[in-house]
Image: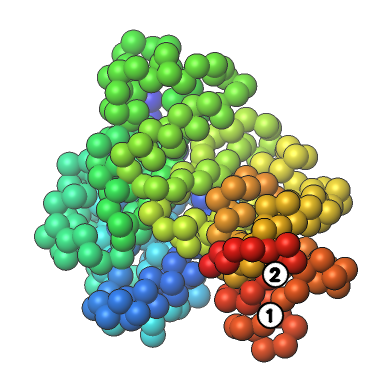
């Protein structure tokens, strides 16, 4: 028998929970920075919103020696807090940047909802310009109405979609969220559970709902218990078909084995969002966009050992040889075209610095004052005939 969602055994804070919270917590800060700047530039009300669609209890019962979230501003009765407090804390740290922020916490299970409500009621220290709404209901049936009754779709909104399994991951709802210009999401895509049930007729309908069609089995092609990449790639392709323009995946595996537990799937309609999340995911976990302590290929220290700098330099020279390009556009293009390669923004900057020293590029500082490379600085690859910016 599967455990009920309010069974204490499901509420142990594990390494994979911490790995997930690391990404969420580290992304929220640059997300607030960017979206509040966007609000101001667009002359919109300076308001943002975070919807924790599977909010949980806001309280874990135990850890297996995993460090719980470090809250900087918020105090909470929970000894081991969950995503709701993490969201409140990270928004509070940037509260001077917005006029108001709404946090919505949706939870379906009655017992968990009760604990969540009590825990949030006892939570203090979050900024005065943050409002909280706890909603007892199912994500798939409530989220769109809740957003509508708040302020509709024009307020930049981040959705954290973190179910235990996959049965509530309704494709139509996720695609609707993802297709809304100012909305972004981070989904826990439970590939381990899904993989377990792929051949089970009892779960056929649930999987049809997740993928939004009945043809997924033939379309995914080769998949087996040791290779789930086709599964998550098919899912992100399906989302991009009707949802967000861009997606990005982050793998989370068991700490002591090579088994993947789930992927975090991020969706956005903005290249800038993709660039930011990719940077965050590059320095979270063990490396190469993953938390996978037992897999050397995801060890950032080993990857650094083998360099990659020359390859990056060569790529830049080949790709941009005909262009004068701004640094921002160069990074955006590389993010798009070399999505899962190791190189980060800092690596591109370093490669350009070396190319400049070798005389292979000229850099005209526009944003940078002296020797930096950033923003609108112009990179001239010498054979340039066209501007890209
Ligand atoms: C993985 S836990 C959430 C953990 C929480 N996000 C955190 O990081 O601390 C998933 C939660 O979703 C709740 N849940 C299950 N089905 C749901 C649904 N359809 N809509 C909303 N919540 C649901 C469960 O009761 C459980 O509390």
Question: On the picture, is 126 further left or further right than 326?
Answer: left
Give whichever of 39, 355 is nearer the camera.
355
Q: Quadrant of the N terminus?
A: top left
135 lies above or below 44:
above
Colour convention: rainbow
Residue 57, image x, y percentages: 34, 52
Measured in 3D between alpha carbons, the distance from the residue under mark 2 to the one under mark 1, in whole angstroms, is: 8 Å
The residue at 17%/61% (across/down) is 152
Q: Is residue 380 visible?
A: yes
The residue at 42%/14% (across/down) is 218
Does mark 1 have its CB less than 8 Å from ligand 1?
no
The residue at 38%/82% (across/down) is 97
Give whichever of 126, 23 is nearer the camera.
23
Residue 298: quarter of image:
top right
- Farthest front residue in view: 385
Residues at discs 2 and 1 in contact (Cβ within 8 Å): yes
Neighbor class of circle 1 (other Cα within 10 Å; few <14, some 14-19, many 20+) is some
The residue at 35%/36% (across/down) is 241
Residue 24, image x, y percentages: 48, 58
The numbered mark at residue 268 is none
Residue position for label 2: 380
Residue position for label 1: 364
Q: Secondary structure at mark 2?
A: strand
């Amino acid at each position: 028998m599967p455990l009920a969602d309010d069974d204490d055994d499901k509420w142990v804070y594990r390494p994979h929970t911490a790995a997930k919270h690391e990404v969420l917590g580290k992304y929220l800060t640059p997300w607030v920075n960017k979206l509040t700047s966007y609000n101001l530039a667009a002359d919109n009300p300076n308001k943002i919103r975070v919807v924790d669609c599977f909010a949980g209890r806001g309280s874990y019962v135990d850890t297996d020696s995993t460090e719980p979230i470090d809250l900087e501003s918020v105090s909470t009765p929970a000894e081991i807090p969950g995503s709701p407090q993490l969201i409140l804390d990270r928004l509070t740290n940037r509260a001077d940047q917005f006029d108001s922020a709404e946090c919505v916490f949706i939870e379906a299970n009655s017992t968990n909802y009760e604990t969540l409500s009590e825990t949030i009621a006892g939570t203090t220290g979050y900024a005065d310009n943050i409002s909280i709404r706890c909603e007892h209901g199912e994500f798939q049936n409530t989220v769109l109405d809740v957003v509508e009754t708040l302020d509709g779709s024009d307020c930049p909104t981040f959705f954290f979609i973190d179910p235990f399994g996959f049965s509530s991951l309704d494709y139509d709802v996720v695609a609707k969220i993802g297709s809304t210009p100012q909305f972004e999401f981070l989904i826990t895509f439970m590939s381990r559970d899904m993989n377990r049930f792929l051949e089970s007729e009892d779960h056929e309908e649930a999987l049809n709902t997740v993928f939004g069609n009945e043809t997924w089995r033939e379309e995914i092609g080769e998949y087996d218990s040791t290779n789930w990449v086709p599964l998550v790639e098919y899912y992100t392709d399906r989302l991009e078909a009707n949802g967000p323009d861009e997606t990005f995946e982050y793998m989370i595996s068991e700490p002591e084995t090579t088994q993947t537990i789930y992927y975090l799937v991020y969706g956005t309609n903005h290249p800038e969002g993709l660039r930011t999340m990719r940077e965050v995911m590059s320095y979270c976990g063990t490396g190469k966009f993953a938390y996978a302590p037992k897999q050397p290929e995801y060890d950032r220290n080993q990857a650094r050992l083998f360099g990659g700098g020359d390859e990056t330099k060569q790529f830049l020279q080949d790709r941009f040889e005909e262009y004068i390009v701004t640094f921002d556009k160069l990074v955006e293009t590389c993010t798009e075209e070399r999505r899962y390669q190791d190189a980060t923004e800092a690596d591109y900057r370093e490669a350009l610095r070396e190319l400049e020293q070798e005389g292979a590029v000229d850099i005209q500082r526009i944003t940078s004052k002296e020797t930096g490379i950033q923003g609108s600085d112009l990179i001239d690859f010498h054979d340039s005939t066209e501007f890209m910016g």
